[in-house]
Amino acid sequence: MNLNKMLAFLSQEDLQELTEKILSTEDKTFQNITFRQVLPFLDESYIDALFTKHLLEQEIFNSLLPFVSDSILETVVQSYLNKEIDCDIKSMLPFLNSDCVAKIAYQWIDENKSIHKILPFLSDQTLHEIVLDYTNGNEKYDIDELLPFLSQQDIRLVFQYNLKKEK
């Protein structure tokens, strides 16, 4: 019997039992079924619980990311920002809402960390707010790093600001 063909027909209870069996193995495989193959069939609350439980196990963490609820992702980001946990926040970026990404960016800026890896995920609104802050005299930003991601309007604001600045 090929258990893989049964996945879509199993109950949540059976899927969870199978998942626990898979996770207990070293290679995260049971009878040729991998952890990733089971994920699309698991319910969100169980995935959220798994994510919280395995937050620091990179392989499991990365596999779960596309399936985790927004509320759990926001909770993890808040815990990261409060320095309560240290997880791979960069891997989470494609799955976070724009508010979470902005909060991370602003904290990294305040901590003088590079936001280079966050830039593709920042909303146009957040980038515009950074430009406005920069053009109001707050030069804690590496504005050169932001240029490829700015709108023409924001590039013009930066240009005009720098033209009017004294040497």
Image (spheres, rainbow, N blue to C red):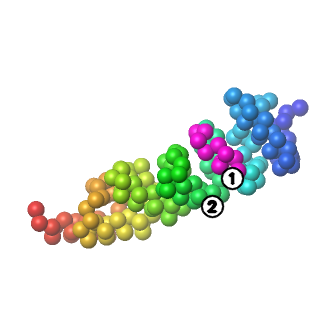
Determine the residue positioned at 31% across, 68% down.
133
Residue 32 vs 161, above or below: the answer is above
> Which numbered disc covers residue 48?
1
Determine the residue positioned at 10% across, 62% down.
167
Looking at the image, which is closer to me, 97 or 138? 138
Give how far across and how far down residue 119 sits, in percent.
41, 55
Image quadrant of residue 143? bottom left
Looking at the image, which is closer to me, 103 or 144? 103
How crowded pointer 1 is (Cα within 10 Å; few <14, some 14-19, many 20+) is rated as: many
Q: Is residue 141 visible?
A: yes
Horizontal relation, residue 111 to residue 38: left or right: left
At label 1, the amino acid type is Asp
Q: What secondary structure characterizes most of the magenta part? A: helix
Determine the residue positioned at 77% across, 40% down.
19
Quadrant of the image containing the N terminus? top right
At label 2, the amino acid type is Ser
Residue 57 in magenta stretch: yes
